[in-house]
Image (tube, rainbow, N blue to C red):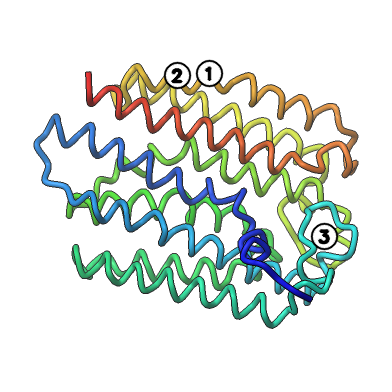
Amino acid sequence: MKRTLIDWIIASRPWSFTASLIPVTAITAYLFLQSGTFGWECDWWNALLALPMLVCMQASGNLIGDYHDHIHKVDLPGCLNGVCHIHSGKFTPKEILCYGYTMLVVAALLGMIILLRSDFSAIWIGIAGVLLVYFYPWLKYHALGDLDVLLGYALLPALGVSFVVTGVYHWEVLLLSLPFGLLTVAILHANNTRDILNDHRAGINTMCINIGGVASKYIYVVELLLAYLLVVVFFAIGLTPIASLATFLTLPLALRNIRTMMVAEPLAEEPIAVLDKMTAQLQLTFGLLFTLSFLISALI
């Protein structure tokens, strides 16, 4: 089947790349604010290089995951997640797997360039990131996918960016990454809640299968609301500026998503068919406002 460049791009699921972009932009903006206050010397080029590196890493995870989901018959024709590039015949499973590993190699090469510009002592973060991508299918099938996402798309990128930009680990960024990190996990959680019946049929095990449809709905609500609560707590203890409260402008989107989840009957797939994409939209807008709050505070 004839493929275009757009087909290759779509196969990597670019709508999900907000998960890897926001950790870099938000933490870089925080470092920019703090550098003006404390006079830190920062290498902003490393932050810029981290953007394509994490996007390539996420694309790799998406593609490798799609390959394993196809092999384990998780994704079948007509499935609601919209992943159809293999069973439609547009790409072979081997092509998707090779594509995924190619993206992982590109990400690793970009990571090496960043380490050459900073310090190789941070290589443990890169190794951990690669392992999280490589083992994601296994972790997902054993109810550890949510932990993988929190580590790989929030905690580790935040800590890594803080180090390669300033040369020092700023451990408070682990806390700062939690609000958008929870929303990133909620993207996967929405997906897994929708797919409880399908995943159970395929014989894999997710957290949503373990706790059931009703509990999964409430966990989703907690993930969203806790993100906003943490912003208030961080402002109250002086970790973030008052401008960070602008993230509450996205609360209508969060309430829309919560409503969509809660009105759906347990194990009903259709009503929440695109809730993962709706959650990605929320994570993007929340993350951009979080980022802007630091930049604006640094400039005024």
- The disc at residue 106 is none
Q: Quadrant of the N terminus?
A: bottom right
Three-letter amino acid code at the position of disc 2: Ala
Residue behind mark 2: 246
Q: Earlier in the sequence, mark 1 or mark 3?
A: 3
Mark 3 nearby-residue class (10 Å; few <14, some 14–19, many ≥20): many
Three-letter amino acid code at the position of disc 1: Leu
Q: Residue at x 56, y 37 (%)?
A: 283
Q: Residue at x 59, y 26 (%)?
A: 225
Position of residue 96 in the picture relative to residue 38 (left or right): right
* Numbered disc in front, either 2 or 3: 2
Q: Residue at x 76, y 36 (%)?
A: 217
Return the x and y of residue 280 as percentages of the image width and height: 62, 41
- The disc at residue 199 is 3
Q: Quadrant of residue 66?
A: bottom right
Tell me the distance, in whole angstroms, between the alpha carbons under discs 1 and 3: 35 Å
Tell me the distance, in whole angstroms, between the alpha carbons under discs 2 and 1: 6 Å
Q: Quadrant of residue 127?
A: bottom left
Tell me the distance, in whole angstroms, between the alpha carbons under discs 2 and 3: 38 Å
Marks 1,3: beta carbons within 8 A = no
Q: Residue at x 44, y 65 (%)?
A: 129
Q: Earlier in the sequence, mark 2 or mark 3?
A: 3
Q: Is residue 17 above or below residue 66?
A: above
Tell me the SS state at disc 1.
helix
